[in-house]
Amino acid sequence: MRNYFSAECFKAFRRKYFYIALAVCLAGEGLLLWSYWFTYSRGNVHISFQSTAIELLLMLSFGLYATILLGDVVFSDQYKWGTLKNEVSYGVSRSVIYLGKLLAAGLLSVVACGVMMGFYLAGCWVLFPHGAGDGLFFQMLGYCLAGALPLWISALAVIMACFFNIRSSTVGTLLAVGILMVLSNIIQILGLLVNDVFLKIYEYMPTVIVDNLKNMAFDWSYVGRAWLVGAVWTVGAVAVGLMGFHRSEIR
Amino acid sequence: MLNYIKAELWRIFHQRGIYLLAAALSGGTLLFCAAFHNGSFQGLASAVCVTMIVGVLAAPALAQMVDSCAMGTAKNELSFGLTRERIYLGRLYTSLLVGAGLSLLLVGLSLGGGWLLLPHSAREEDWVALLVAGFCIAAAFPVWCGMLSACHMLSLFFRGNAGWVAAYYLMLLIGAPVVMLAAVSLLNQLPEQGSVVLQAVIAPVVLMLPGVICGQLNWEYQVLCWGVGLFWLAGTTVLGLTIFQKIEL
């Protein structure tokens, strides 16, 4: 497993794809920082480290959908190019292949998250004035990250299950988007039409929890709910993905 | 060109994908209508007005119906003697036609089904609600076409489909709000209308947000939507055609 994981990381970190995607995201953050600095330099007194850095907490759902891109960096149309059957023919067990790629995508995600958040926060720290609210912001950041992390991991598990079990990467991507984005809305509608129990289920959907985290500070039982939901979705997605991959014919 | 479009339509309608997409969108439409009709056709028509963003969200799936194997088969089409321009534009026109057909299906299901099955209030109120829904759809249509053209360009430019599809949704969900935030900060000195236009040009999805639609039911909004939609349609077509003429197939 260790050698396979190293090989996957070597491949992922050697490709330009990851760095181009990261550069585009950092450019977007740079644009935002520049726009805030522009208005601050023209006398806007409402701009501060806290008021700009807190925008990060409004974009926690980015971590859910960014896993699709990061999963694609690692998996990258292996059914289309026929390289997956080469790995299986070589003798690597399907479990090692699946978990190795999942862990590699996870490492990529941690690096990307660290770089993007670090860049934005460093920019806000350096460019804008500080105040008494800084401490509160960091507490909020810690709270939101504690809740979002297991949900981001569960999204990665879902996307990898889709990539491994659907031959078309586009259909896999659209299915993952459907599960992450659309499913919660369908459950909400079912709650309005059919039974209130669906509204209860809606409250336990990853997208809903991620979007609601910033409003629930500092209710640590809500973070507990995030960890429980994240663990269930992760274990479920890995189990379904692995089982499907073990049974599928790889052409 | 017509023969090429007919051939593409034949291929698309002999595959499962389009029927699965139509079924999924129809199912979602029926669920939405069942949940939000508020007991009358007027209520349904009002609810339909805030669903225009669905066309923008469905664009990548529609583009993939037409372009999923394009980069693999394009060299065969070129060898046959078709020009690159015909291949690019033929697939674009096909995707726009299929998109228009899907839109008609969903509008027919929602508004047509609602007109037949739901109770009506005063006739004049129903017609006004229908006109407002028609106004929203007419404003959204060019934006849908612009986004579909952008997806068509991306699907022929990027070898990996998952990457651009993921990037498209990320741009919609996160990129558009970031652009709006940046625009609000940078363009503080501009008149509000100028700021709105620039945001719409950079991120057309903002025109489809329910909050924006509800407050902008005027002819300026209609003109803005047509301008932005046609700008994106023309711009992405020119850019896509230029790239497609130069890349090695």
Image (cartoon, coloured by chain):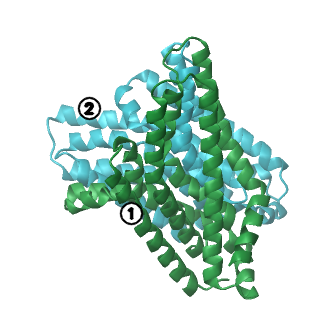
Chain colours: A green, B cyan
Quick one: label 1, few (<14), some, or many (20+) residues within 10 Å? Answer: some
Q: Chain of mark 1?
A: A
Q: Chain of mark 2?
A: B
Task: Give the quadrant of residue A41.
Answer: top right
Q: Nearer the viewer, residue B35 or B41?
A: B35
Quick one: label 2, few (<14), some, or many (20+) residues within 10 Å? Answer: few
Which residue sits at x=57%, y=53%?
Answer: A66
Q: Tell me if residue A56 comes above or below residue A125 in the rendering.
A: below
Indicate the quadrant containing the C terminus of chain A: top left, top right, bottom left or bottom right.
bottom right
Which residue sits at x=43%, y=47%?
Answer: A143
Q: Is residue A137 visible?
A: yes
Whole-number angstrom distance, CA of label 2 to CA of label 1: 46 Å
Which residue sits at x=51%, y=39%?
Answer: A56
* Three-letter amino acid code of the residue under disc 2: Val
Q: Nearer the viewer, residue B20 or B12?
A: B20
Q: Is residue B162 visible?
A: no
Asked if badges 2 and 1 are on one and the same chain, I answer: no
Pinpoint residue B75: horizontal percent, then vertical percent: 80, 63
Residue B97 is tagged as none
Q: Which residue is mark 1?
A: A229
Residue B128 is tagged as 2
Asked whether, in this view, residue A161 is left or right of residue A210, the answer is right
